[in-house]
Amino acid sequence: MRLAHARTADGDVPVVHRDGQWFDLRPLHAAVTPAVLAPDALAAIRTADLPAVDDPAEFAPPLTGIGKILCIGLNYTDHAEETGATPPAEPILFMKAPDTVVGAGDDVLIPRTSVKTDYEVELAIVIGSTARYLDSEEDAVKHIAGYAISNDVSERTFQIERGGQWDKGKNCETFNPFGPWIATSDDVADPQDLELRLWVNGDLRQNGNTKNQIFGVAHVVRYLSQFMTLYPGDVINTGTPAGVAMGRADGAFLRDGDVVEIEITGLGRQRQTFRQA
């Protein structure tokens, strides 16, 4: 099952895809909010009699009311290698503000002083129930409502060369395209075997698989729950495979007018045009 917001002339409409068809979710919910991600709410959506709608032509972000966006750095063996970093002994954590989120097809703004704006295709975990101090990875997966695509856009000069926290290079306006939809956990057979691809102007830059994560999905959720409470609507970006501009000999950072396209197995496709702010 897929949850999304269709962008229409009358505003963003919550929709659900099941049994090969999109349906209007408004008889049950005015929007896809964290409350919709609860197990009992998802169960009701699966069986509800809802009006069918045409396939959406454009998607807004698939979740409103995101609590926090937690991000795992250097979480693929090949990405750590290309950046010259030692694979971490524990997950590296940084955060993005929810106001960085835009839709899968929205423009992304290159900051005015940026010279190293970079792309990162990532599998995003969406939390569906409150989790704290989880005992096992088996318990962790029970708290995952679903998965989506995130583009963890980064400005490398801000992130690395300007001192302090990574957050400076991660929280620029529009720096987290998200969606087009959230696929519920039962719709993703194995989150540790999903292909991730990213193109810049038609050139394939990233071509990886989540099986190469250093810390898998369940491990990340259990680990984070030891330090903070995870709430419904929290999003976890789980890292990116090799091929980012920072790891290329030619740099090839993003410039005004560049088009980035992204896909992950079963989670749809993104397409952003990068524009100078």
Image (spheres, rainbow, N blue to C red):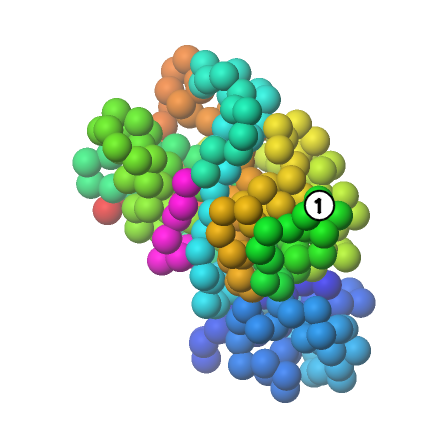
Q: Is residue 52 left or right of residue 158?
A: right
The residue at which mark 1 appears reads as: 136
**Which quadrant would residue 218 be assigned to in this image?**
top right
Against 228, residue 249 (above or below) is above
Q: Is 26 in the magenta?
A: no
Residue 2 visible within the image: yes
Name, please, the residue furthest toward the bottom.
27
In which image quadrant can residue 35 be found? bottom right
Q: Position of residue 200 (x, y in %)?
A: 47, 33
> Residue 87 vs residue 185: left or right?
left
Q: Residue at x 71, y 74 (%)?
A: 40
Asked if residue 82 shows in the view, the reply is: no
Is residue 100 highlighted in magenta?
A: yes
Decide: is 125 above or below 169.
below
- Residue at 62 percent across and 64 percent down: it is 129
Q: Residue at x 65, y 40 (%)?
A: 219
> In the rendered structure, which segment of residues is drawn in magenta?
94-102
Residue 201 coordinates in the image, percent (x, y) = 46, 34
Q: Nearer the viewer, residue 90 or 135?
A: 135
Q: Of helix, strand and loop, which one carries label 1?
A: loop
The amino acid sitting under disc 1 is Ser
**Measured along the vertical axis of the image, is residue 150 above or below residue 184?**
above
